[in-house]
Amino acid sequence: MSDELKRGLEGVVVAESGLSHVDGQVGKLVYRGYDIEDLALKAEYEEVLYLLWHGELPTRAELDAFTDELVAEREVDDDLLETVATLAEADERPMAALRTATSMLSAYEPEADADAEDRDAALRKGRRITAKIPTILAAFERARQGEDPVDPDPSLSHAGNFLYMLTGTEPDAVSEETFDMALTIHADHGLNASTFTGMVIGSTMADIYSGVIGGIGALSGPLHGGANQDVMEVLYEIDESEKDPVEWVIDVRESGRRIPGFGHRVYKVKDPRAKLLQAKLRDLSESSGDTKWLDYTTAIEEYLTEEGLVEKGIAPNVDFYSGSVYDHLGIPLDMFTPIFAMSRAGGWIAHVFEYQEDNRLIRPRARYTGATDAEFVPIDER
Ligand code: ACO
C-alpha cells in the first residue's frame, strides 16, 4: 500500500460517475452528456433533476408526473415552520438554520424506517427533501422580516414558487426564468467538497437526510459556497466608497489579496456558468434600467483581461456574476449560499444514489506522524 500523500485529495480519482463532467481547459460542463448551456437555456430545473436522478431526459408525460410528485411534497409541517421562525428570531445564520431544519425534516419523514437499499423509498425521500428546502428557506427569510410564511403555490414551477414564497408576489417571467437557470447551473459539479461529503456519508449506507445535511455543512464554508456573497460585498463596497471599480481592483492587486469570483481549481478559462449568468445580468440590467452591477463587473473583468490575469488561467467563475443576478431578483445577500444548497441538493442526492448502487465504504488512511512508543503514566503520577 503506497504512503504517497495527496493533500486535499487533489487529483485523486475515488469513484466512477456518469453524472457531470467538467473540462476546465476548454470551459465545458456537461450533465449526463448534455452541455450546461443547452440545459440552462432549454430545460427547466425539474427536467434537470429528473435527468440527474433517472439517467435520461424525461418525456413530457414523465416530467408532468415528476413535477406533480414534487409539488405534492412542498408543504412543511407547521411545527417545523415554527422552529424555523424561532431560528430566525435567534438570529441563526441561514446555512445553519437550513442544516437544522433539514435535520428536523426527517422527524416528519413517513418512510424514515426504510433501508437505504430501498431505492424507491430513497428516491421519494430525496424528492421530499428537494421539494421542502425552498419552503423552509422562504419561511426563514420571511420570519426574519417579521412576516408569516407564504403557502406554496402548486401552479408555479420550483423556481417560480420559491420566489413567490419569498416575496409573497408571483414573479414575472424573466425573474422566474432567470432563477430557474441559476438552479440548473448550480445543480451539479463533479466531486466538489459538499458532494464528496454527501458521498462519504452515503457510503456508510446512512440515509439520504444525513447525506444532504452533511452537504449543507460542507457548502457553508467560505472556501466552498461563500464566494458569491464575497463578490456582492465587493460590489456594495465599491458603490458605497464611490470608487471606480478599476481603482478598487488595482488596490486589491497591489495588496496581494485575491479577487473574489476569479480563479477555479478546475477551470483554467472562463467558467461556462459565468457566461450564462453574465448574459442574464445583462438582460436584467437592461430591462430594469439599472446597469450598476453590470457596469462594475464588466469593468473589473475587462481590466483583469487586459492585465493578463485571465490568460494566466484566473478567469471569472460562477460566483462572479451570480450575486448580482440574485440582487436583481431581490434575494438578500446571506441567502445566496442557501440558494446554492437548494439547487445542489439535487446533485448531492444523485451522487449518493449513484454511489450506493455499487457501494464501497469510503475509508482512506492518514500517514501517522504521532509517537509510537509512549509510556503510559497513571493519572496521579503525571
Ligand atoms: N485573484 C488573484 N489571484 C489569484 C486568484 C484570484 N481570485 N485565484 C488564484 N490566484 C493566483 C494565486 O495567488 C496563485 O498565484 P501564485 O502562483 O503567484 O502564488 C495562483 O493563482 C494559483 O492559486 P491557487 O490558490 O493555487 O489556485 P487554486 O486552484 O487552489 O484556487 C480558488 C482556486 C480557491 C477558487 C482561487 O482561485 C480563489 O481563491 N479564488 C477566489 C475565491 C473564489 O472565487 N472562489 C469560488 C470558486 S467557484 C466555487 O467554489 C463555486
Image: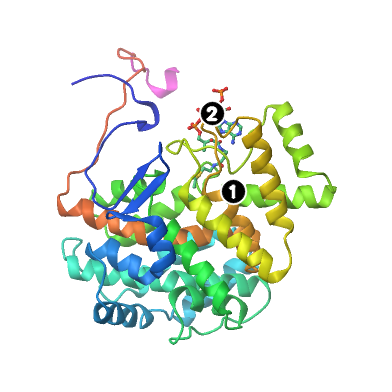
Q: Quadrant of the C terminus?
A: top left
Q: Hey, what amino acid is under mark 2?
A: Lys
Helix or strand or loop: what does disc 1 sit on? Answer: helix
Point out the frontmost of discs 2 and 1: 2
Image point (38%, 68%), residue name: 43
* Residue 305 part of the magenta-drawn span: no
Q: Position of residue 74 (x, y in %)?
A: 41, 79
Q: Hey, what amino acid is under mark 1?
A: Phe
Q: Is residue 325 left or right of residue 292?
A: left
Q: Position of residue 181 (x, y in %)?
A: 47, 65
**Which residue is the site of mark 1?**
320
Image point (70%, 70%), residue name: 288
The answer to whether mark 2 is within 8 Å of ligand 1 is: yes
Query: Is residue 41 among what the camera can see?
Result: yes
The answer to whether mark 1 is within 8 Å of ligand 1 is: yes
Residue at mark 2 to residue at mark 1: CA–CA distance: 17 Å
Residues drawn in magenta? 375-382
Nearer to the camera, 67 or 109: 67
**Which residue is the site of mark 2?**
312
